[in-house]
Amino acid sequence: MTFRTAMLAVATASITFLGGTAASAVQAQTPSGSQWRTSSTTLSTLLQDGYKIVAVVNGAHGNAGPADTIFVQRDQSAFKCIDPQQPDAKTKTSAAPPACFELVPPSGAAAASGTN
């Protein structure tokens, strides 16, 4: 399986995950067992560093409202960035700030793969 195929599989799984929990995913820390680690980098910085956009998912994210999830990749590194759309001026709710997450091996994967 190529990295691109794996990335698309992860993107599909993330879409399912984000459909139910995106409101908390943007504002809360990533769970310890997650393959996505919160990153302080921005989408703009990633693109300037040579990352390429490989997928964009538009969707409603529960109480947080609509947001775009942008997946970027360079070599064997991948990030997803969640960019909430700004709410209507009529609604007094504010959108969560944009956030990026780095794809990392799941917790315990290194220990599990080291035992043969």
Image: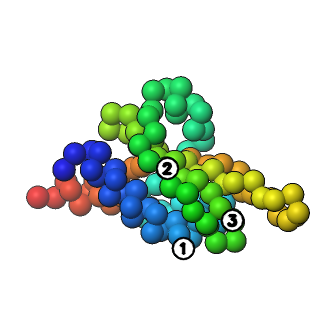
Kindly indicate whether the residue at mark 2 contacts the one at mark 3 (C-beta within 8 angstroms).
no
Query: Which residue occupies the foreground of this view, 47 or 99?
Result: 47
- Residue 38 can be seen, yes or no: no
Say the numbered circle drawn on residue 56.
2
Tell me the residue that label 3 is attached to: 65
Query: Which residue occupies the foreground of this view, 107 or 19?
Result: 19
Residue drawn at (19%, 50%) of the image: 1
Residue 27 rendering spot, x and y as whole percentages: 66, 60
Tell me the residue that label 1 is attached to: 20
Left-right relation of 1 to 33: left
Q: Residues within 10 Å of mark 1 (few under 14, many from 20)?
A: few
- How many numbered badges does the structure rendering display? 3
- Give me the C-alpha separation between circle 3 and circle 2: 17 Å
Label 3 element class: loop
Q: Nearer the viewer, mark 1 or mark 2?
A: 2
Q: How is the image coloured?
A: rainbow
Q: Amino acid at mark 3?
A: Gly
Kindly indicate whether the residue at mark 1 contacts the one at mark 3 (C-beta within 8 angstroms).
no
User: In the rendered structure, which disc, 1 or 2, sits on the residue that comes first in sequence?
Assistant: 1
Q: Amino acid at mark 2?
A: Val
Q: Amino acid at mark 1?
A: Gly
- Give me the C-alpha separation between circle 3 and circle 1: 12 Å
Residue 68 rendering spot, x and y as whole percentages: 58, 53
Label 1 element class: helix
